[in-house]
């Protein structure tokens, strides 16, 4: 029987919606999808999709840290959701800067719409072993 732990942190955006910021199951952490929302203000960040991508990954890293991990260094899989694949190259620029070493596995898909009408959202899986 597996043991799970819900991860809660003020360092990543919180929501009244029925989901956890992250769920740890053994050494694996599943991080919920995050858009470019500043956890301090609850507002979407200003700027282009590169700046939004940085904020999204900072939110993911905060949940990994709260679970006892080492931020983006522990991320092994990311799913990127874009409302416009024309943003793909700009997202890759910011993404690559946030993962300067060996990047995690990744999927990128175009979707018709995201909550808050943001341009980018990501979820992630981290290994905390």
Image (spheres, grey):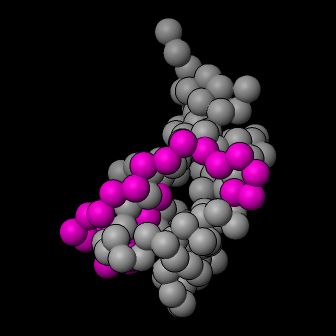
Q: Report the residue that reaches farthest toward the left.
A: 112
Does residue 69 appear to the left or right of 47 in the view shown? Answer: right
Q: Nearer the viewer, residue 2 or 118?
A: 118
Quadrant of the snapshot with the C terminus: top right
Does residue 112 appear to the left or right of 64 in the view shown? Answer: left
Q: Is residue 30 visible in this depiction of the protein?
A: yes
Residue at 54 percent of width and 42 percent of height: 105
Residue 53 higher or lower than 78, as above or below: below
- Residue 51 image position (x, y, % from top left): 59, 81
User: Residue 46 in magenta?
Assistant: no
Q: Nearer the viewer, residue 129 or 110?
A: 110
Q: Is residue 65 visible in this depiction of the protein?
A: no
Q: Nearer the viewer, residue 127 or 116?
A: 127
**Total tally of numbered discs in the picture:** 0
Chain part drawn in magenta? 99-122
Does residue 32 appear to the left or right of 129 in the view shown? Answer: left
- Residue 16 image position (x, y, % from top left): 40, 62
Residue 54 higher or lower than 122, as above or below: below
Residue at 69 percent of width and 57 percent of height: 99
Residue at 34 percent of width and 70 percent of height: 85
Does residue 64 appear to the left or right of 118 in the view shown? Answer: right
User: Residue 120 in magenta?
Assistant: yes
Q: Report the residue that reaches farthest toward the top.
A: 1
């Amino acid at each position: 029987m597996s043991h799970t732990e819900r991860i809660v942190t003020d360092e990543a955006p919180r929501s009244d919606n029925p989901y956890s910021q992250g769920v740890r199951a053994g050494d694996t952490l599943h991080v919920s999808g995050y858009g470019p929302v500043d956890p301090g203000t609850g507002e979407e960040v200003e700027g282009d999709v590169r700046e939004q991508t940085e904020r999204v990954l900072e939110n993911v890293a905060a949940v990994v840290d709260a679970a006892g991990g080492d931020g983006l260094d522990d991320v092994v899989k990311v799913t990127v959701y874009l409302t416009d694949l024309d943003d793909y190259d700009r997202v890759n620029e910011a993404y690559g800067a946030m993962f300067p070493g060996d990047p995690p596995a990744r999927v990128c898909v175009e979707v018709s719409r995201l909550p808050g009408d943001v341009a980018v959202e990501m979820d992630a899986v981290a290994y905390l072993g």
